[in-house]
Image (cartoon, rainbow, N blue to C red):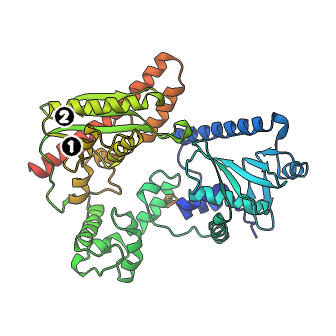
Amino acid sequence: MESIVIKPSDAKSWLHCKRQVWLSNKGDLEAESEADPFLELILQLGLDHERNVLRRLSDQQLGQHGVKSAESVDETLKLMDQRVPIIYQAQLSNEAEGLVGRPDFLVLDDDGLYQAADAKLSKNKDKKEIQIQLGLYRRLLGNGKSAIVFLGDGSAASLGDEVDAMTEKYVADMRVLLSSDEQPSVKYSHSKCSGCSFYTHCKSGFDATEDLSLLYGVDGRSIGALGEHGINTISQLASADPETIPNVPYLKSSDKKARAVLQAKSHLTGEVFEMHPVELPQGDWVHFDIENNPLVSRGENHVYLWGFLVPDAGMDNGQFEYVWTDTFEDDEQGWHRFLEQVETYKARYPNLILAHYSNHELTTIKAYAQKYNMMGHATVRYLLDEGGPLFDIKKPVADSLVLPLLGYSLKDICKHPGLVNFQWEDEGSGSQWSVYQFNRFLSETNLEKKEALKHAILSYNRDDVTATHRLQRWLTEEFINN
Ligand code: SF4
């Protein structure tokens, strides 16, 4: 019988999707996607953080002699026997239990016992994947000592008995999962699946069975109960009378049922349905989108670009305006310049509408106002007021329309040739692409190349605000003026 090996590094994938962890351990599929530069950037930053922690620990040991690297499980055991104060890149194994683990560090404490430790970019020690990983190291060491996590904000936290239950659940579930020769049955999730390296494999299966989880807005928890009432496929739901669909979990209101049936019809026919009249506020529209770097050292967030599109009178193109800051050191100055820019628009347009897609801009403004202790500032109050200028243009789309899409992101809607049909200049661009390019900008020393990177980031942001402008125009032409 094939032996099972359970690794802490699979915890993230296990939490994300059970099938993903099964396919990457048991499947014979090649991962479909090419190397993701954003993930490579995260890996690189993680390595840098780990090296910084190593340097700190070495300094505490008054030099490298107190730190030794391990190349194998046996070498780790040897170094532990020698009571080496810090063992770097340790390797632990428990063959009987089928567990292996590679903590970044083993740290000898004052009681003469080792503590496992990992360096993580996250600021949050309560992340489940961190708890499981560190919990497994604890289990492999078996000495009851807490594990240590060196977090991205420079702090250190310890994880003790409280992580054991979740770790046990992970081990028990992975044992069952990896013992099976059948890939686990799961639901489609657009946010998880669209970026997954097994997308083509899984999507063809969901399509073949007309899986209800392909439908936007149909909660996965409704699906089993719908099946008990004879609705197992998209075709069956499309031909159902919403009035006769029984109340099932997360599908109780008539509006939700009608929407689910229309979503099924739209999926099959490509038709667009207007469930409620589309309403847009009247006023002077300025389209707004931000780009932020969550990867600033010590866990800070830096909005490097506050972008605006001020449409011209003909509603065709518009003027792209922005506030940019080169580094996190200028973050507060950028925030103040953003507020000044808002004041400029407020003075210029008596009926200002600051349109953005989804709530990221609103939550970021709130977070910045709190970060800089400015909740009482007049411009902040104006922005956050209930009747203020911020307007989430996703709302009329999600409330009123049913679209032939798996997801309702700005890109999903705008790129669709039968809908807004607006194409970004750079096919591969996205918010993670922008963060990746900004981090290249930060480390680039050649001024010409640096300028080219900034130009590319600005173009991407200009396309984003142009997209919300085109969406506004499409909604107006198709549903309001029609
Ligand atoms: S495509 Fe979706 S269902 Fe398939 S492994 Fe990836 S996340 Fe899981």
Give whichever of 424, 459 is nearer the camera: 459
Residue at x-position 61% and y-position 55%? 130
Image quarter (top left, top right, bottom left or bottom right) of the N terminus: bottom right
Is residue 459 placed above or below 285 in the rendered structure? above
Dot 1 or dot 2, earlier in sequence: 2
Numbered tag placed on residue 389 in the rendering: 1
Instruction: Give the percent coordinates (x, y) of residue 196.
Output: 50, 53
Residue at x-position 54% and y-position 49%? 32
Numbered tag placed on residue 107 in the rendering: none
Q: Which residue is mark 2?
A: 346
Quadrant in the picture for residue 361 = top left
- Looking at numbered disc 1 in the image, what kind of residue is underneath it? Pro
Residue 118 seen in this snapshot: yes
Residue at x-position 72% and y-position 35%? 55
Q: Are marks 1 and 2 in contact (CB under 8 Å)?
A: yes
Is ligand 1 within 8 Å of the beta carbon of the residue shown at mark 1? Answer: no
Give whichever of 33, 430 is nearer the camera: 430
Tell me if 254 is positioned left or right of 117 in this view.
Answer: left
- Looking at numbered disc 2 in the image, what kind of residue is underneath it? Lys
| Element type at mark 2 | helix
Tell me if 176 is positioned left or right of 327 in this view.
Answer: right
Residue 210 seen in this snapshot: no
Mark 1: give few (<14), some (14-19) or many (20+) Cα within 10 Å: many
